[in-house]
Image (cartoon, rainbow, N blue to C red):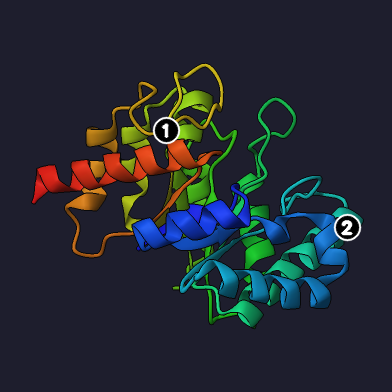
Amino acid sequence: MLYISHLLPDREMAQVLEQTGAGVESIEFSIAENLDNLKENILDYRGRLRAMGAEHLTIHGPFLDLNPMTFDSRIRQATMLRYAQAYEAAAELGAEKIVYHTCYHPDIYLLTGWAQRTAEFYQEFLENRKEIKVVLENVFDREWEPILEAIEEVNVPNLGFCLDIGHAHCYSPRPAEEWARAMKKHISHVHVHDNLGDKDSHMALGQGNISLSRTLMPFLLDEDEPTFTIECGNKETVLASWEMLRDLKSCFF
C-alpha cells in the first residue's frame, strides 16, 4: 500500500490519488493548533478526505517540543496528551497506522537510558490502545540500536518502526541500506524521499544519491511488504517518486 504525504494542496492531492491509487498520510494532526480544536478538525478533515477521494489513511503524529523520554514530568504529560489526541484523530478517521518521531536529538540528549525511558512511555501509552499500528520514525537518530532496543522492550504487536530513508541518509553515518537490513524485522512503514547526504531536502527518488535498489529491495521482495509514504513537497516530485517505485518493483518481478 502506498500513501502520499499531505504536503500538497487538496486539489493536487485529489489528482495524485486518482492517478496513483494511493492513500493519504495526513500531517494535519501533527500541528498543535489543530489538536487544540480536535473535534472540529476531525470533522473538517473527514470532509476533505472524502472530497479528495482518499480511501486509505495514515496519520503523522505531533513532534515539535515533545519528548517521550523526557525527565520532566510536565513535558511527559504534554507529550502523552498530544500523542493521545493524534491517536484519537486516527481512530475517528479510520487510519491504518500512526507515525511518531523518536524525538531524539543528538548532542542534546544522552543515549544512556534513552531506550528504557522511551519503552516506559510507550508501554503506558499503548496499554489501552491496540487497534492502530504505531510506528516510530527515525529523524536525527545516528544509530538504530536504541530504537530497536526500545521497540523490543515494549514487545507488543502494534508497535513497529517507520524507516525514513532520507533521514537515515543525511543524519546517520551508517548507510540507509544498513538501517533497512538491521531493522527489517520491525519495519512496517517506510518514508521515501531522496537527498544528497548533506541536508533533508526531500527530493524525488532518483534525484539524490541514496542507493534505492539496495535500500528498498529487501522490502520489495518480501511477501509481507511494508507500506510506503512518498514525502515530497510538490506534485512533480511526488509523481516522479511514484514512477521510480514502480520501476524498482518491476525490476524484481
For image coordinates 14% across by 47% down, the residue present is 250
Q: Answer with left or right where residue 229 lies relative to residue 137.
A: left
Residues packed near mark 2 inside 10 Å, few (<14), some (14 to 19) or many (20 plus) = few
Residue at horizontal 28 percent and vertical 33 percent from the top: 212
- Secondary structure, mark 1, is loop
Q: Tell me the kind of residue under disc 1.
A: Ala
Report which quarter residue 215 is drawn in. top left
Which x, y percent locates residue 14? 51, 60
Residue 68 visible from this viewpoint = yes
Image quadrant assignment for residue 222:
bottom left
Is residue 62 or residue 206 the one in the foreground?
206
Secondary structure at numbered mark 2:
helix
Question: In the displayed structure, does residue 95 sit left or right of residue 174?
Answer: right
The residue that appears at 74% across and 71% down in the rendered structure is: 84
Residue to which mark 1 is pinned: 204
Could you say where residue 220 lies in the image, as x and y percent from the top left? 22, 51
Residue 151's disc number: none
In which quadrant is the N terminus drawn? bottom left
Residue 116 x/y as whole percent = 62, 54
Q: Give me the residue at 82% from left, 75% from top.
A: 40
Residue 138 falls left or right of residue 209 = right
In front here: 76 or 96?
96
Q: Disc 2, disc 1: CB below 8 Å?
A: no
Would you place residue 211 above or below residue 154 in this image?
A: above
Disc 2 residue type? Ser
Horizontal and vertical percent for residue 209? Answer: 35, 21
Q: Nearer the viewer, residue 114 or 83?
A: 83
Q: Which residue is mark 2?
A: 73
Does residue 151 appear in this view? Answer: no
